[in-house]
Amino acid sequence: NAGVTQTPKFQVLKTGQSMTLQCAQDMNHNSMYWYRQDPGMGLRLIYYSASEGTTDKGEVPNGYNVSRLNKREFSLRLESAAPSQTSVYFCASSVGRFNSNQPQHFGDGTRLSIL
Amino acid sequence: GEDVEQSLFLSVREGDSSVINCTYTDSSSTYLYWYKQEPGAGLQLLTYIFSNMDMKQDQRLTVLLNKKDKHLSLRIADTQTGDSAIYFCAETGSGGYQKVTFGTGTKLQVIP
């Protein structure tokens, strides 16, 4: 009963280092998302993938890249980490069918600190 | 663009009812959701309502939708300490890929 799995759960980086956050879902969902959550700002969409083979920018894409490796996996990469990217990162997935009820299912998050 | 607003904080006594409010701007919203986030965890879907409904009840949870005023509320009856969490309102539009817009979350504190 895994749902959406994110790794790692915690990470500390130095400014300028790179890292990839991993996300996998086992619900055969078409759409996947990456959000960041900061105090008082709710969830902000970084990138999303409406279906396998496509990715699009969300609200705050600068400083990030993504890869939809296959239907199950959607990774988020920080090429050169900055302190402003200290946040909690959530991956989510949804069915992605046209005109259907599409609640998003979330992972438990990755807590990332950039020093 | 679409916007979803919530008050940041609500405090209630154990056993009382809690009412968390949300307003949204997207008139084409088709589904509206309530999520719960406990400390250190991701968002968990609590309940949802389709835009052609006024009310939905699910055990202790009652969702009310006023589409004219674009106002959504979540009522939790007999609030327990385990209900302490952040509650997010979210909405999604119609057609094709459906971007979900989340509110900033309301932190519910339940006082024993």
Image (spheres, coloured by chain):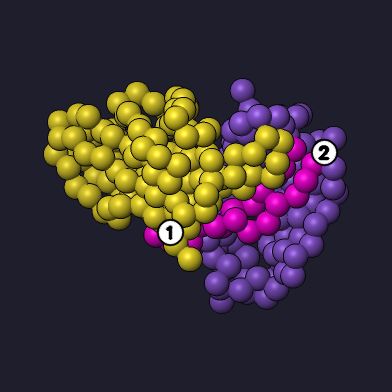
Tally the numbered discs.
2
Horizontal placement of B45 versus B51: left or right?
A: left
Mark 2: few/some/many CA within 10 Å (<14, 14-19, 20+): some
**Label 1: which residue?**
B41
Q: Is residue B44 magenta?
A: yes
Three-letter code, disc 2: Lys
Which chain is assigned purple?
A: B
| Residue highlighted by disc 2 | B67
Front one among A94 and B46: A94
Which is nearer the eye, B66 or A68?
A: A68
Which residue is at a point 47% across and 34% down the rendered structure image? A52
Q: Main secondary structure of the magenta part?
A: strand
Residue at 70% across, 29% down: B95
The structure residue drawn at horizontal position 39% and vertical position 26%, both measured from the top left corner, is A61
Q: Which residues are magenta?
A: B30-51
Chain letter matching colour yellow: A
